[in-house]
Each structure stands twice: as C-alpha cells, then as structure tokens.
Image (cartoon, helix red, strand yellow):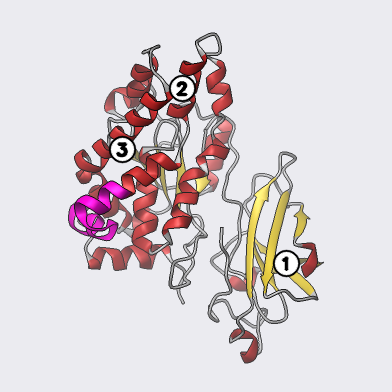
Amino acid sequence: MRVKRKNCLFISAFFLLFAAGCASTVKITSVAERTKDGELLLKWEVSPDQEGSINIYSSQTDGDISSFTPVKTSNISDQVTVINPSSPDIREFYILKTTSAYSGIVADRIIEMGNIKNFRDLGGYFTRSDQQMKWGKIFRSGDLSSATLYDQERIRRLNIKTIIDFRSEKTAGKYPILVHPNIRKISLPIIPMDTEKINEMMSDEKLTRSDAIRNVQDSYIGIIENYKNEFAEMFNILTDENNYPVLLSGSLGKDRVGLASFFILYALGIPQNIIIDDYLLSRQTIDVLTIAENVKTKPEYFQEAVTALMSVNHAYINYTIDYINQKYGSIDSYIEKELKLTPGKKTLLRKHLLYNQ
C-alpha cells in the first residue's frame, strides 16, 4: 500500500506542523502487516532519505485524529518496528510522523478469521489526486457459510451493516450465510466462477492449466458482459451512506468480488497498478496448496489446472482490462455507461469513501 503525506488534512493541536513542513516534499510510505504471532509489523520508507526519529501514534478509531496517542519512537533508518496491539480482537489505526511529514492512516489490511477465507479491508489506498480511501467502509471476503462464532463476533465488531452476496441462488441456498440477523443481506447472483461452476470444471480430469486459464478468462468476460445490472445495483447500494460498512462476499472472494473491487477502486481514482496489486493479494489469503492437496493423487497437469482455477493471475485481470478497453474505449466509459455510475453517483461514492481534504 502506498501511503503518502496528506495535504494538511489531519492537522490538530496534537499533530501541528510548521507551514514549511506541510509544504515539504518529504513523503512517508508505510504498511502494516500482521505476523503469525499476532504482532503487528509497521514498515516505512521516508523519501528522500533522511536521519532522525519517526514517531508512531495509534487509535482505535480513524474518525477522530485527536484520539491518536503516541505509542513508540524509532529511528527512521530502522524502517520497521514491532507493535503489540492492545488486544488481538480490537483493530487499531496508526499514523507515522517525522519532523517534516506524516503518513496517512495505516492499518492492517488482512483481517484474520477462523473459517472465513480472504477477509480484508479495501480501504487505505490513495487516489491519483492523493486522497486516501477510508478504512473500515468496504470489506471483501470469501464464503461466510462456515463462519464460526468468533468470526461472527469479529464481523459484528467491524460494524458491518450490509453484505452483498455474489454467489448463485443455488449455492446461497445450499450454504446460507452465518452472521448476526440484524445485518442486511443482499443477493446479487453472478453465476460464472461460482462454487458450482468451479466444481463442474474440476470434474473434468482432462483439464489442463492452459484450459483452466482460458476458462477463467472467458468467465470474466461473461461476467463483464452479462452481469452489468448486478454491478450497477452494487453501485446504487454504495451511494447510500446508510448501507455502510459493506462486505462484498463470494465463494473464495477472488473473482466476482475481485472484479467488483476493481470497479469500485477504479471509480474512486485509485491507480490501476495499485488495484491490480489488491486483486493479486488473494494469493496471500487463499491457501491454494491445501486445496491442491485434495487432488494430489491426480495427474500433475490436472493439479496444475486446479491450482490455476483456485488462484488469481495477471493473465486473468489483464485480459479483462484489455477487453474492456478495446470494446468500450476505456474502463471509465464502461463504468459510467454500462454500470450506470453517473458523475453524480460517482461524487456520492467519493464523498462516502474518501477522507476529506
């Protein structure tokens, strides 16, 4: 995640900087990563290089900058420090500050769950105009039907109000979502890349890796062409502030949810390379090796095909991007004309999802 110094957005009595510091070209790039032991690694780079100290502040909310309190001071040259969160179940936000610059708000993107795969926060990214997307507004995940009580409590603590379920009606009926009944569940079924469809492809033991890649690419184009109304309705839901926070959910949360996330981030003005990185992050959050273990007695070519089906790939998203650009002129044109995200709706979307400048 690229985290840059914001225009004097977060200035308060606590974070007061000299005017010269605010106008500085110094930038802090930072990311938070959770370790297997439950600790948090805060990593940073300060550009241009400089010596001195970097101060770290934390808060349990990103809505009130005055609530951030100092937790640690490190040397800029260390570039990483370990933070012990106050509780493994309470999410914390961080700001890093030097004498001349400070970061945007930093948080761990991947949220560990018991049985839910690929659960993560879509926030924190920066637009091309240097506005940061709010944390805790849109989450994405895989199947919620096996959620443990711990998972359900974590979802409740994230204050999620609306779940958009992209699974087919057949799959949703067979594997109902397990969350608190007060959370609104909206079904926007998209058939390609559903559990049933993937199982159908996996039943063909003649399937090769190249076949699998081609099938996924074709499925993505099928989604682009045949489910415009579902994506348009998704944007309608996202333009209503009362629906937030929202969770986008699918089977593995990598394909239909991946495309939905791509369109949302693109509409907000996030750079395309950052959006692709977010799409590829499913490589870290889905244990493909465990899935492939189930077919280890099958021929190697079939194991490779299953791995291709269960993972994300540059070949999938780049193929889709090229297709949209060639047929519709640009992704912006596709989103505006085909998904009905008018300039007015886009303004509302950015109002709800970007921190104010």
Dividing the picture into quarters, in which one does residue 325 lie?
bottom left
Q: Where residue 300 sits: x, y (%)?
A: 52, 15
The foreground one among 97 and 204 is 204
Report the residue marked by disc 3.
220
Q: Secondary structure at mark 3?
A: helix
Q: Are marks 1 and 2 in contact (CB under 8 Å)?
A: no
Dividing the picture into quarters, in which one does residue 256 lie?
top left
The answer to whether residue 166 is left or right of residue 1 is left
Looking at the image, tell me whether mark 2 or mark 3 is earlier in sequence order.
3
Q: Where residue 179 sits: x, y (%)?
A: 45, 35
What span is colored magenta in the figure?
322-338
Looking at the image, tell me whether mark 1 or mark 2 is earlier in sequence order.
1
Q: Secondary structure at mark 2?
A: helix
On screen, residue 194 above or below 48: above
The foreground one among 209 and 17 is 209
Report the residue marked by disc 2.
306
Q: Where residue 137 sits: x, y (%)?
A: 45, 55
Look at 69% across and 45% down and name the residue there: 88
The answer to whether residue 222 is left or right of residue 201 is left
Depth check, mark 1 against mark 3: the one in front is 3
Q: Where residue 328 sits: x, y (%)?
A: 20, 54
**Type of the residue with mark 3:** Tyr
The answer to whether residue 34 is left or right of residue 220 is right
Q: Secondary structure at mark 1?
A: strand
**Type of the residue with mark 2:** Val
Look at 41% across and 30% down and name the residue there: 251
The answer to whether residue 16 is left or right of residue 352 is right
**Type of the residue with mark 1:** Ile
- The Cα atoms of the two marked residues, 1 and 2, are separated by 44 Å
Does the magenta-highlighted stretch encompass residue 336?
Answer: yes
